[in-house]
Image: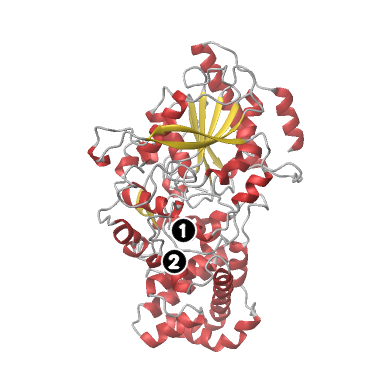
Amino acid sequence: MKSFLTTTLATGLALGQTASAMTPGFSHHHMAKRQIDHAAILASTSSHIKAYDIPVPIDHFHNDTRYEPHSDAQFHLRYWLDTSNYRPGGPVIVLHSGEFDSTARLPYLEHGIVPVLTKAFGGVGLVMEHRYYGKSFPMETTSTENLRFLSVEQALADTAYFARNITFPGLEHVNLTAGAAPWIIYGGSYAATVAALSRKIYPDVFWGAISSSGVPQSIDDYWQYLEAARHFAPKGCVEATQKLTHIVDNILFGGDKEQIDKLKELFHLQGLENDEFGETIASLGGIMSLQSTMWDIEEDSPHLGYYCGAVTSDAPLFASMRHRITRARHFVSVGGYEHQVNELAMPLLNWAGIVRFNLRDALKGSCKGKSARECFSNRFLNTDETSLDWERSWKYQTCIENGFFITGTGVPKDQLPLISRAVTRDYAAWHCPNLFNITDLPNVDNINKFGGFDFSHSRLAHLDGAQDPWRAAGVHAIGQKDRKSTVSEPFILVDYGVHHWDEFGLASGTEEQDLPPRQVVDAQQAMVGFVGEWLKEWDAEKGGKHTKDTTSDSAEADEL
């Protein structure tokens, strides 16, 4: 749900980026282009953090016909363990990895939110992998039949089974199972929804949970994804994108094949169908990349800045595009903006230039040997059932219950969209009938019945970034009623924050003045505060004594 969050857009935009998550539902096709260097992550991870696995049942629900034919077999669920901060009586802090290979989450275990909490309370820290991701595949292939055990409820049952049955290597003499020790589960993006549901459905197992950028309201047609960009991206960039997208749509829906073909050629995307074209220029252009902005330069993406600078410039930014200015002026005119040709021709030309350069890099890199259509169209997604591919797993989840298909058609008619209206729900969900033979709409009620926008539970914290594209599917969605933040149910909106910014931390040796930003420090320290109160409640109910390590906390404060 690095994440559901994540949805249904084909983009090659964040090439070279690590997985910032969600990933709930939007066409993770673009995420597939990301070059997440697992080997480099492992090489930079401290030697005391090690991978283990535990056998868990493939099928937790033998009375549910949904999972027929049932299985009595087990599979190995991977987890990464850090006991370096453990003190007797300390809690277990679980970070769920969601829809990614758990290796991508190791930075959070070493210098992110996990050590913030384990150092404060002497806890065990671990990253738990999600079934059907990373090294935790129950089946040898990802055929539709073999994917039948991939569901949120099965994944939740894994977390409970794990907590009830685990014996940690090196701590075999200590009973740290749920009930004997307090378990706090944290997740960012789709994993945040897993964390929240784990607390609500298994309250006897998880003493508390923290949901960061969670998406408890599953939405089939998630046109709202770009509302964050509309509200929070630079105003001039938003207005230019709306007008340029309107020009594109006026041509695409105008029915003049010659004009349509010439427009696609301007972007070097000839041969793409209209829906493929509309999605690709949005994702390769840059307006989709708000989610990838981050306070840490090691994780930040420059694409939104590059894009907004390009479409608000009145100068040609690409030497190789200068000779096409006459064509750009022509398209602005025939696209219905003949009175703003001087204002919009250069932004259109620069937009096409950005798309061309990102396309060039993709076709030389992750899509080498493929055409643009093969690289970016949903119609050319991975059909190899023998491939244990996270993308197939996630796309299956979007089809059965998660949804989050990003469209242009869903945008209200009285509002200029930021992505072409040629991007329909049928195209965004093309993989459902064509890869998995799933023709029904996703059963979003499997998730929403637990509260959706109103999701709440004791000792469950909700944190969201004010500018997160996934905010519209969560408890902090604009238009939802505000809540009072309490110790039992913290309700925190991180100013200027985007996608689970509080999960990140700075690696040793990369410290920089004023980083993390104040609002992230405040959010992380708020977590230390309310988790401390939750542990006091545990002590009062179960017996024991949890104290905050003020020496460690003081040292961390000095570093920040």
Would residue 430 be found to the left or right of residue 44 on screen?
Answer: left
Q: Name the colour scheme.
A: secondary structure
Residue 30, horizontal then vertical, whole percent: 49, 61
Label 1's element? helix
Label 2's element? loop
Whether pointer 1 and pointer 2 mark residues with C-beta atoms closer than 8 Å, the reply is yes
Residue 237, horizontal then vertical, whole percent: 56, 66
For badge 2, the amino acid type reads Ile
Foreground: 107 or 200? 107
303 w.r.t. 256: above or below? above
Foreground: 311 or 422? 422
Name which of mark 1 and mark 2 comes first in the sequence.
Answer: 1
Which label belongs to residue 226?
A: 1
Give the residue drawn at x 56%, y 83%: 342
Characterize the local packing of mark 2: few (<14), some (14-19) or many (20 or more) Cα atoms within 10 angstroms: many
Give the residue drawn at x 24%, y 40%: 68
**Is residue 112 among what the camera can see?**
yes
Would residue 14 be found to the left or right of residue 408 on screen?
Answer: right
Characterize the local packing of mark 1: few (<14), some (14-19) or many (20 or more) Cα atoms within 10 angstroms: many
146 w.r.t. 29: above or below? above
Q: Which residue is mark 2?
A: 419
For badge 1, the amino acid type reads Leu
| The quadrant where residue 326 appears | bottom right
